[in-house]
Image (spheres, grey):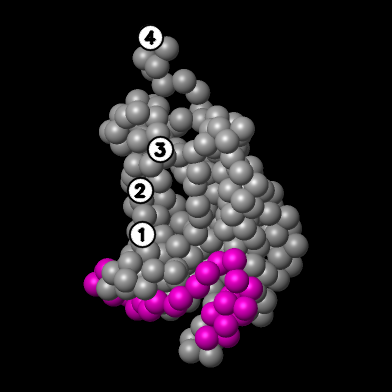
Amino acid sequence: MTGRLEAKVAVITGGGSGIGRATAIRLASEGAIVVATGRDEEKCGATVEASIAAGGAAEFAALDVTDELGWETLVDRVIAKYGALDVLVNNAGTYLIRPIAETGLDDWNAMMEVNVTGAFLGIKHCSKAMADRGGSIINVSSVVGMIGAPWAVPYGASKGALRALTKGAAMELAPQGIRVNSVHPGFVNTAMAEYAAENFGTTVDGLNAMFPLGRIGEPADVADLIVFLASDESSWVTGAEHVIDGGSTAGVAAGATE
């Protein structure tokens, strides 16, 4: 029995940990050829090993998502080696918790450069490689790109921009058979959640009460959704926002106001 992504070539940014690592492993387990990118070769190497162990093919490629030449080099390498590029997962991102009044312009610019410009460059260069055969681009945004969150204003603004970038790209690239969708997780059990919990004076487990389903997400939860969006099962889905947050943006969890 073949996998849902058999022989599809997938590039994942921020592949060294968290959602990126879980996604690489899941895509590989479904038959994809995974190119896990990032700036930390050791962490991405561990992702590659785990992806291969899951039954797929994988390799590491160094990439700073804010470097346009780096994107050009990456896409040329992938096409030269595999002859195709079918899936792009724009997962790389950075997070900052800080009051607006204490946020420097450098902080703001760094957030926009990684979270928005990095995704834009990925879409720009990978879509060229997908134009002849179609493909799927998945942008990992956040629920904070849809609702306001104090002390995370630059992050929310960047993820909101990524939401709009997704929709515009989906409309422009649809005639080429390229689908573009965004994924909007709530807190997921990664280093970002640990950082948030520390700043909120709690633990990762202490964040569970925020979610009607009683727990924060796991990287595998988001990876499963990304597999669907990468596969042909979602062939009529584009320009859509896919919220995966344990119900946190749907309303107030039972008991939360007691």
**Marks 1 & 2, CB-CB < 8 Å contact:** yes
> Viewed as shown, does residue 165 lie left or right of 186?
right
Q: Please identify the quarter of the rendering in which residue 181 is found.
A: bottom right
Residue at (45, 39) in percent of width and height: 186
Distance, label 1 to label 2, CA atoms, is 8 Å
Q: Earlier in the sequence, mark 3 or mark 2?
A: 2
Taking the image as drawn, is residue 102 in sight?
yes
Span shown in magenta: 50-77
Residue at the far left in the pictured view: 53
Amino acid carrying label 4: it is: Glu
SS of the residue at dot 2?
loop
Viewer-side label of 4, 3 = 3
Q: What residue sits right under mark 2 in the picture?
A: 190
Which residue is identified by label 3? 196
Find residue 84 and report its horizontal and vertical position in percent: 54, 82
51 part of magenta stretch: yes
Residue 87 on image: x %, y %:
52, 69
